[in-house]
Image: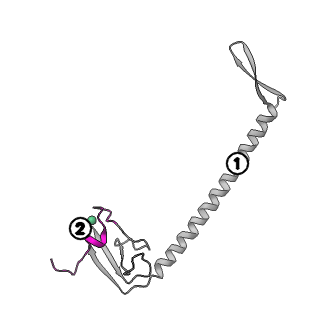
Amino acid sequence: MEYKGKLYGKIGNKYFDTSHTAEDWDKLTSRVKELEQKLQASNTDLLHDVNQRLKRRQLVDRMEQYSEIIEGKCKCGEKVNKVLNSSCTGWKNGDRYHYPNNNTAWCIFRCKNCGDVIHETFTSNNDVG
Ligand SMILES: [Zn+2]
């Protein structure tokens, strides 16, 4: 700012002291710039971190160990695969449910279509009836 010293405000014809100076304004302006740069840098770090995690997640997907994948569906008709003895599941019995064509390391808990718990509604395509 070209001006030095106190900054004043104006209401009608009356001026009042803002209790800030031009130097305060300059400091504030450069502080905002500095914080914006820091924020941008930390966003870049965050994106880098997310990318690294995604790569690791993909590696886990390729390394999943299991005995069998059973194609089937939820009682509502939503197609679901059941992986037996999966190394990538939270279920103690080793079951892992996922949507076909979306074989990430995620486990389905509730069906995205009807909202019911998938391990209660799953039927294999090989089951009769
Ligand atoms: Zn369903």
Amino acid beneath label 2: Gly
Packing grade of label 2 (10 A; few <14, some 14-19, many >=20) is: few
Q: Quadrant of the N terminus?
A: top right
Which residue occupies the extreme right position in the image? 4
Q: Is residue 98 left or right of residue 73?
A: right
Residue name at image x 62 percent, y 56 percent: 43
Sequence-first disc among 2 and 1: 1
Q: Quadrant of the C terminus?
A: bottom left
Q: Which residue is mark 2?
A: 77
Look at the picture and state if 96 lies above or below 77: below
Residue name at image x 46 percent, y 77 percent: 61
Residue 111 belongs to the span the image colors magenta: yes
Q: Position of residue 81 (x, y in %)?
A: 32, 75
Q: Position of residue 19 (x, y in %)?
A: 77, 27
Which residue occupies the extreme front position in the image? 92
Q: Position of residue 97 (x, y in %)?
A: 35, 74
Residue name at image x 26 percent, y 73 percent: 122
Query: Can you tell me which quadrant of the image ligand 1 is in?
Result: bottom left
Task: Locate residue 25: give its quadrant.
Answer: top right
| Cα–Cα gap, marks 2 and 1 | 52 Å
Amino acid beneath label 1: Leu
Residue 20 belongs to the span the image colors magenta: no
What's the magenta region? 110-129
The answer to whether mark 2 is within 8 Å of ligand 1 is yes
Q: Which residue is mark 1?
A: 35
Look at the picture and state if 80 lies above or below 13: below
Look at the picture and state if 72 lies above or below 40: below
Q: Nearer the viewer, residue 23 or 20?
A: 20
